Image (tube, rainbow, N blue to C red):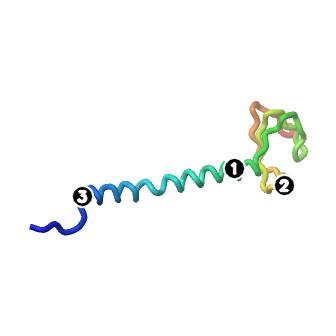
Amino acid sequence: MARIGPPACVLSIGAIVLLTLPFPGVVTVIVFQRFNATRYWRTLEAAETIAGMHVPAGSRVRYADKKQSIPVSIESPNAIEIRGM
């Protein structure tokens, strides 16, 4: 009886290669996002006033643009008072 098609080991190796292909792509996307995120995030070395609010040192500020002129969010390492709240 003649064999038709490739042996099972070739098919299994092909399946393994096909299933592992997305992982390098995901790693590439994650590395690019982290590199690109540094353009929009900044950690304050000293206390600053941003958008009229006193922000303590160590806070992380996220901006909407690469010029870092429009603040979007602020992550503070401790509680801060926001305009009397």
Disc marking residue 8: 3
Give the side of residue 69 with respect to residue 10, left or right: right
Q: Nearer the viewer, mark 2 or mark 1?
A: 1
Q: Residues within 10 Å of mark 1 (few under 14, many from 20)?
A: few
State how far apart marks 3 and 1 are (Cα): 42 Å
Q: Nearer the viewer, residue 51 or 9?
A: 9
Q: Quadrant of residue 19?
A: bottom left
Residue 43: % across, % down: 78, 39
Rendered position, 1 above or below 16: below
Secondary structure type for disc 1: helix
Q: Nearer the viewer, mark 3 or mark 2?
A: 3
Q: Earlier in the sequence, mark 3 or mark 2?
A: 3
Q: Quadrant of residue 44?
A: top right
> Circle 1 is placed at which residue position?
35
Disc marking residue 67: 2
Residue under the point 83% across and 52% down: 68
Give the side of residue 1 with respect to residue 58, left or right: left
Q: Residues within 10 Å of mark 2 (few under 14, many from 20)?
A: few
